[in-house]
Image (cartoon, helix red, strand yellow):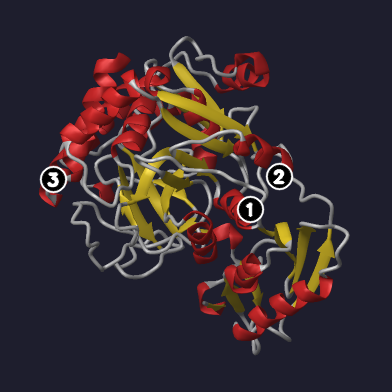
Amino acid sequence: MGLPRIIGLIFSMHHASQATPEDIARIREKRFRRLLRTAVAKSPFYRNLYRGIDIETCGLSDLPTVDKRTMMANFDDFVTDRRLKRAEISAWLEDKSHFRKMYLGKFIPFRTSGTTGENALVIYDRRALDFVHAALISRQAHPEEMTVLDILHLMFTALFVKRFGMTAVLVTGGPYPAYTIAAYPPPFYKLLVKKEIYSLFDSVEKIVEKLNASSCNELYSYPTMLSILAREQLAGRLHLKLDPPLATIVSTSEPLTESTKRLVQAAWGMKIQDTYGSSECFMMARSCGSFERMHVMADLCIIEIVDRHGKPVPDGQTGDKILLTNLFNLAQPFIRYEVSDVTGYSTEPCSCGQPFPTLLQVEGRTDDIFYIDHPGGGYDAVHPNLFIGPILELTQVREYQLAQTGRNEVTFFYVPVNPAIDIESKVREVLENGMRRAGLLGRVTLKTTCVGVIPRDERSGKIRQVISLIGAPADLDDDMLRH
């Protein structure tokens, strides 16, 4: 696509951020119809699914939903290029020498983490990934609104004076979503950006050592790692400096907790730009320069908030899942695609004045909810943050994982900063205090285990801080569920 195209996307997205909701609706409608036409013309799956539907006049809710299992079972017909075959792409991905290369010279395939069940195969082409990079550049969170001249000046400075420094701590060494974004930059990217990627598989000590030898404008990582790095900075072991202009800390891939925000604020005196996306749509929402909440990128995707039965949930309320429509990926159309994320639309406007709707707190995936017995029958749906929020204040804990190991039992695995110091009693005290405040003490058995390392998820390579090893009850029903 080249430099002219992505520069055009950057400025068009910047302009859209200053437009009206009516303008965004017109952009969304144009892209939505193009997506439907492409899907019906080039995807046998969608051509059959939408048989009898007028794609020029239908509303979004007139279309059937699609889930991961259905998509993967029909993958070869789901995509819009007949050369794309599931078996061949899977075999191609197994060859590590292919990483950073483009499949058939045009496509970037990767697997989702699969932490919520069956992993999926996702395809982007260069055009779709250019949309993602343009959004990352044009919609950074800045306390003061930037003009076109400001952007041009920054690009000139990066090109002729000093490149913009971006440092990321990510899962590396494979086709993982966040790493894919970093590994396939636009062709001109190296002229403007000095990129350093450190592996999450390295020890914290090694990551700290590398970061101490560098500086950057933007730090990009998962909230769990940002918490660890903030503790290292506060302890004086890490001396990372974020250089102006555009000093930014960005979180990705995991729910951002208030405790992590406080840790980062204490460590660097900065707020975190939170991002929300999925493998099926990298750019779904981002916090603005006011850092009040995340704005849905409504010109790039459509997010429907629904309950467990697929019924719309009113604004101001949290749903059980979302239906995602990606408006810019024409190679693999995701239209009303089920994603098990827990969030909702906010009814409160953001002070920044952007035309995009805002979200309530993205609490995580439905699969990360713990279901425990309710006295008298039924189950309570308990978000794990009720258990572990206080533990983030413990500077003696470096990494942790909370696992539901029984219907009314949780096990807290933790790695201490100093293995020579016994902090077992302190860990239990903090966790039990949190459980007492949540009304769970006495109802849930707590086990704590000190370990040398928290195992990484074998598919994503990341630590699953929260995991239910037993899943939802087989007889779970809305009538038996109490939030």
Residue at image point 53% right, 56% down: 267
Q: Pointer 3 and pointer 1: residues touching (CB < 8 Å)? A: no
277 sits left or right of 257 in the view: left
Residue at image point 63% right, 65% down: 392
First in residue order: circle 2 vs circle 3? 3
Point out the image quarter for the N terminus. top left
Percent x, y of residue 238:
63, 47
Q: Amino acid at mark 2?
A: Val
Q: Which residue is mark 2?
A: 204
* Numbered disc in front, either 2 or 3: 2
Residue closest to the eye, 157 or 428: 157
Percent x, y of residue 49:
36, 36
Above or below residue 288? Residue 72 is: above
Element class at badge 3: loop
Q: Which residue is mark 3?
A: 19
Q: Which residue is mark 1?
A: 228
Res. 16 visible in picture: yes
For marks 3 and 1, give the CA distance.
Answer: 38 Å
First in residue order: circle 3 vs circle 1? 3
Q: Residue furthest bottom?
A: 376
Residue closest to the eye, 174 or 104: 174
Element class at badge 2: helix
179 sits left or right of 308 in the view: right
Q: Amino acid at mark 1?
A: Ile
Residue at image point 73% right, 43% down: 205
First in residue order: circle 1 vs circle 2? 2
